[in-house]
Image (cartoon, rainbow, N blue to C red):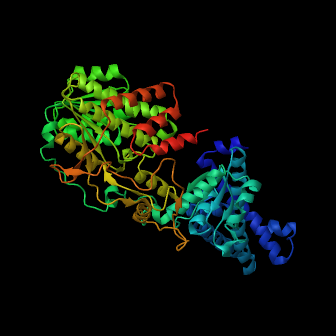
Amino acid sequence: MYRFVSTLSRQAKRIILLLVDVALVPVALLTAFALQTNGLPDGRGLLTHWAGLPMLMVIAALLVLVTGIHRVQLKAYESRAIMMTGVHALLLGLATAILDDMAGYGTPLATFINFVLVYFLMCVAARVVMLQVLLWVYRSGHEQTRVLIYGAGATGRQLAAALRTDDTIQTVAFVDDNPTLHATMVRGLNVYSPVAIDGLIASRQIDRVLLAMPSLSRPKLAQLSRRFEDMGLDVQALPSFAQLTGQEELLGQLEPVAPGRFLGRAPLDAELPGGSETYKGHVVMVSGAGGSIGSELCRQILACQPAKLVLFDVSELALYTIDMELQGLRRKAKVEIIPVLGSVTDAALVGRVMTHHGVEVVLHAAAYKHVPMVEKNAVVGMSNNVLGTQVVAQAAVAAGVKRFTLISTDKAVRPKNMMGASKRLAEMVIQDLASRRGQKGGGDTIFSMVRFGNVMGSSGSVIPLFNDQIAKGGPVTVTHRDVTRYFMTIPEAARLVLAAGSFAQGGDVFVLDMGEPIAIYDLARQMITAAGYTLRDAQTPQGDIEIKITGLRPGEKIHEELLIGEGQTTTPHPKVLLESAEHLSQIEMASALKALRKAIETADDAALRAVVARWVEGGAGFAATEAHQP
């Protein structure tokens, strides 16, 4: 049956509809006579009075062709087509009355009225029955998706009507939050309360949920979506038909939030007083060139017109991305760009790259910086961040590099986690090499480091995390109600590094005047508001998104610091300060690195923490942490 129906042409289907309308004429006439006389006429009366039936059927066929009812598809047979059928029945009844009068039969007027009504009802009923039969045939030939519609409002009703003629979808029921709709029937479907969803899914074998509540805020839609997805269901959200026609803005078309708007201070000025001369016409190498800071450094260095820019990164994708971007930008400047794929712990490769390309300036941004990851992978983190820094710095000395700048972090100040400790040890490695400058084997490289706080918009920072959580409907997670952080934007951070590198005299520790620290809880509230939503808390339980306090992570501080020592002096840049930092003696540093290498080679986490506890300022807490290791 399915094969026969599916192979019928459109013309064949129209002919069938026409024949049905014609075939119903004698049936309707017979029924009208039966209703009028309260019984069937005898055979002689039928032969006498129905001699003009063939002509009436021809007229019916002509009227069908004129009105075009046969061209209306069964699945599109609605109010307008029903009116066309009514006009057709009325004209056919009029034609029947005229033929009866011409023949002189004198049939009562009520019979023709009955005929019009009966024929109209039969035509409509025939199409409804044929549609249901066709849907049954089509559905028997396809695998069906059982659908639950969430929302019995105008959009939900329109959706149910549209899906009724889809042979691959069976709409099972409505669910709606409005209690006045519960236990009612809409579009032939029962409306249930949300509390009945679990039972409906199990008993009615639901495959997909369609969210037909476009007026609901995006966070609440996201929360509903996650709830159903956790049940193993497909979830789709439907915009309103007004939105589809462009009368309203579609959901999700929100203006991106610029990270810099949450700084609470004016951005740093764009000027580098004399800084660009440090890089113009020189060969510059950036390690970690594909990272957030590294890539911005590359962009700004390219604007300084170096002779050559060497991009060094361990990530193939990150390296490819920044290389392709810079290749497009360099059309305005004749700069040779050299992408190098490799690890900073590969001493042979790093040395070969610096010597072959004649590197004069190194900006060392390569590091594992995500606190939870380094905390769980301390051996690898220490190896990359500390020994990798030593490899690059020693290669710079051997290759005669003029300037070397280490990108550090405020987490290196009296660290409470392994990532911060690794960056402080990396600083100590640079300070040690700087102290050897001018000595035998110490070279003439000017070493410096730049220490700053969190960078807004970088990978792993709270801005992308909060944006993602807001887009998913929350909750926005904050580790502690009172936690604060220093913030800067990526362009500011890169500008600072380039400026500080040009001021360096050797062994300098530069810090940024970043203003007042920002409360992370307040930042989360601002981002929720900036995205167009309301905070859900005890005062506003009907709000869109809540902030959830998750507790401090291992090694996380409530407040970060930028300075280890007490003294600080100014530099040619008003926002760049110079710290008077103490450092280990060369013998102490050699002992610390020896112990560190041994711990890394044996993958001894406890030994690593012991090194930090002994040699890093404020590292006593790591001994306590180690003591609690199983």
Name above or below for residue 508 compared with residue 67: above
Residue nearest the observer in this picture, 151 or 315: 315
Q: Position of residue 482 (x, y in %)?
A: 45, 62
Residue nearest the observer in this picture, 336 or 403: 403
Is residue 483 rendered to the left or right of residue 259? right
Q: Quadrant of the C terminus?
A: top right
- Quadrant of res 529: bottom left
- Quadrant of res 520: bottom left
Q: Position of residue 76 (x, y in %)?
A: 59, 59
Is residue 455 rendered to the left or right of residue 84? left
Q: Position of residue 368 (x, y in %)?
A: 41, 37
Count of labels in the image: 0
Residue nearest the observer in this picture, 139 or 591: 591
Which residue corresponds to the image point at 27% horizontal and 22% vertical from the top-left? 353
Residue at the far bottom in the pictured view:
109
Residue 43 visible somewhere in the drawing: yes
Which residue corresponds to the image point at 86% horizontal and 70% vertical from the top-left? 40
Q: Quadrant of the N terminus?
A: top right
Residue 189 visible somewhere in the drawing: no
Name above or below for residue 153 compared with residue 206: below
Residue nearest the observer in this picture, 546 or 564: 564
Q: Position of residue 475 (x, y in %)?
A: 53, 59
- Quadrant of res 387: top left
Is residue 628 rendered to the left or right of residue 601? right
Which residue corresponds to the image point at 86% horizontal and 66% vertical from the top-left? 43
